[in-house]
Every structure is written in C-alpha cells, then in structure tokens.
Amino acid sequence: MIVSHGNSAREKIKTAWGNDEGMEVDRCCDPDWWANKCQQWRTYSQNLTLTGEINSEGTQQFVVYDLLEARGKSGETDDPAVKCYQEAKALFRKGYDLCMTIPRSLDDSVLAKHEEDIKTSAETMVDAWLMDDKAAPMSERVLILGQQYEKVLLTNIPEDQKEGFFVKYSLLFSAWILLVGKQFDHCITTLSLAVDTYDDLTARIFFLRASCYFSTNQLDLGIKDLEKSLELDGNFNLAYSILGSVHMSLKNTDLALENFTTYLAKGHPDTPDNINALYSMALLKNKDGGDDYYHKAKAAEQRFKDLYGTHVSMNDVKRQAIQVYETPEEAQRLILAAMPKKQYNEKIERLIKAGILNTSYPASPDNCSRCGATHLKDTPGKPLLCCGGCKAIYYCCRECQKSDYKNHKATCKKNQQK
C-alpha cells in the first residue's frame, strides 16, 4: 500500500536531517539521489573489496555461519540463529538471482516490462535483510535495483503528488542502504518514519535502530529500542546480550548481571554472544564465582572452535578476563596468539622500537626477519635472500631489509667480525 504524508513527511525528515540534506528527502522522485548513491557505493565497495569484506557484486567473503556448511558441521548444532541465517541467505539469493535477470536500465519501457520482477526482487531482498542483515550484502547492482524500484512505484502517481509518497518497503530499502553506508543519523530518521507510520513492524526494526543509536552514542535511546524489541518478541534473546554489554559499559552492574543471566538461561550455547556473556559474568562476579564462569567460557569457546574451526575474536571483555584468571605469561601468550597477523606484527614492531626485541622474527631461512614471509616477495616458491654482509639473516625483499637495518646493523657488524 502506498502511503502519502504529503509535505508533512518531507518537513519531518527535513527537520531531522537539516535543510542542507534536502536531496535525500526527494529520493523517490529525484534520480540524482540514486545516481549519487551508486557512485558512493562504487568507491565504498572497491575499498571493501580490497579488504576482503565483499566482492564486486556484494557477496560477503566471510560469514562465520558459512563455515559450518564448509566444514560439514551444519547438523551438529541446533542454534536457531544459524537456521535463520541460512533461510535469509536463500531468500536473498532468490531475490538477487531475479534481480540479475532485469536489465540495468531506467528506461520507462524496460521498467514497465519488468515491473513485477522489480517489485518482487526488491521486496524479497529487503525481507532477507530484515531476517538477518549478514545474509544480505549490499552491492552496486542492488542500488540500481533500488532506483528502478522507486521509479516503478511512482509510475502512476501524478507529478504534483509524488513528493512525500512512500511505501514501507521503499523506506526499509533506504534504511538498508543508509545502515550499510554508516549514515546512522539518516538511518535513524528513516526507521523512525517507518515506526511512526506502520504498526506491523518486527522486533528487528527496533534492533536495527538501536544499533544506530549505539553507533551515535545515544545509549539511552538504544536501550529503549532493545527493550521494545523484547516487548514485541520475548525470544529475541540477542537483545539481552547486548543490553548486558551496554549496562556493563555504563557500570550498571546489577542490570548487566540481570541481562547476561537471562541471556545465558534463554540463549543458545553455541553462539559468540554466549561466550561473551560468560566472560562478562566472570568479570562481574570476580571472586564471587567468577572463576566458574571463566572456565565455562573457555569450554564454550572450545565447542565453538570445534564447530567453526576458529575462536571468537579477542574483545576487551575477553582480554580482561584472561588477564584476571590466567598467569601473566599465559595471558600474554593467549592474547598475542589471538591477534591478526598485521596487528601482531605492529605489536612486535613496537617492542622492537622499545628495545625489548632486536628483530621481528628470529634469524631463519624459513622466515623474513622483518615481516615473516616464507618466500621471495611476489614470487611464491622462491627462497628468501640472506643479508649480503653477515649471511646470517634473511629477507623477502629489499624494502624489508632496509626497514630492518637499524635493528640489524650492530648484529651484522659483530657477525662479520667473527
């Protein structure tokens, strides 16, 4: 159903976004807005492609749930979040495959011919995004579909009535784009308009708006939205975990304990949120039974690794719990082992600069002493080159040798004198 709020809707959005953002308000009847979004997405997606987060068509490179299927472990957990993701992924693929049969054209005759497919594709992918946003990657093609969708919706609307017209799916499509683009304030405004207009929205809408509030440091409003999501769906257990983390950050210990306890009672034990809740309880309880929660967290993490083949990431809560309950030596080992290679190398470099270490990696023909590479740069299979002076240390390229020379210089001279 198309809903018209006329100029009142336009003014409401303008008030929230500011008059200088007027172009955003006219998205339904201004193709330049979508063209601008497509251009922004080209740059954004190129950056994400370089970091491995998405490819050029928006397919996510790594979602942890996909590891279950890849490892043949799908049947070993009954985590409902896994099932929801798989269903959302299949739904998104259905919409995306249909989208790819539609020409990338805004010509009126093309849009008229494919009108039903455009509507079905767009609304199917929005439904998938609402089920699980991780299953609905954004891409330039999806943005073009959004532009086609808006034009199709306005086909039979008189020109003087287009301003302020929208449908629920067009609002949610816009919110999807804004959230992916990290335009959190605009996403809040768009979702708020949907909340004020429609009374059949799910708990996920409030959860998504809460994530925007937290991203803009509006914690009280985020908390209210999570509580609203629980009013709508008492089994939306993820909200308990996030509420626990937020209250913990605010040092509201009793509320943090209450929400984490509820999550551990109602949530699934195979989730990263379960592990985080256990580590959090270990810190909150401390000497009052905290060690029991810490050991449960380690056991849950081992179960997670058995399923997914990887550990959960090292966040501040996990790091602090490790430092509290492990010996200093073991804590350092666990924390360093969990670091991504780039972060680990940066840590080592800081130790070198502080004079604690003399070189990034011990001298070995198997590793570049600067970056740890196992072969000549850009030439897999070719052995490393040794230092021409001392013949005792190895590098993958001239750049690494030059960068490491200030650390190696003294040792190099000593080795040449032997």
Image: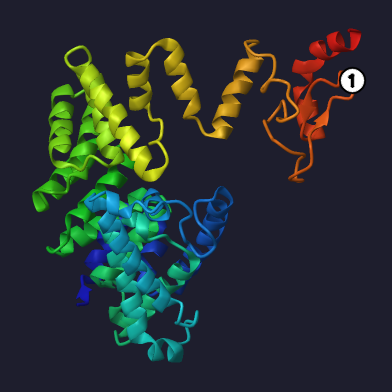
Would you call the spot at circle 1 few (<14 residues within 10 Å), some (14-19), or many (20 or more)?
A: few
**Residue 363: x and y, percent?**
73, 21
* Residue 81 rendering spot, x and y as whole percentages: 25, 51
Residue 323 percent location from the top left of the image: 37, 16
Name the residue nearer the viewer: 13 or 3: 3
Q: How many marks?
A: 1
Residue 17, located in which quarter of the rendered image?
A: bottom left
Quadrant the C terminus occupies: top right
Element under disc 1: loop
Quadrant position of residue 330: top left
Query: Is 173 drawn above or below residue 325 in the view shown?
Result: below
Vertical placement of 153 versus 212: above or below?
below
Name the residue nearer the viewer: 144 or 49.
49
Residue at x 39% of width, y 51% of height: 183
239, above or below 363, in the image: below
Task: Give the labeled residue for mark 1.
Answer: 389
Residue 69 spot, x, y in % from top left: 38, 56
Q: Is residue 49 visible?
A: yes
Q: Does the rendering let one see residue 30?
A: no
Indicate the amino acid at tag 1.
Answer: Gly
For the N terminus, the quadrant is bottom left
Q: Residue at x 76, y 34 (%)?
A: 396
Seen from the viewer's position, the closer of residues 36 and 61 is 61
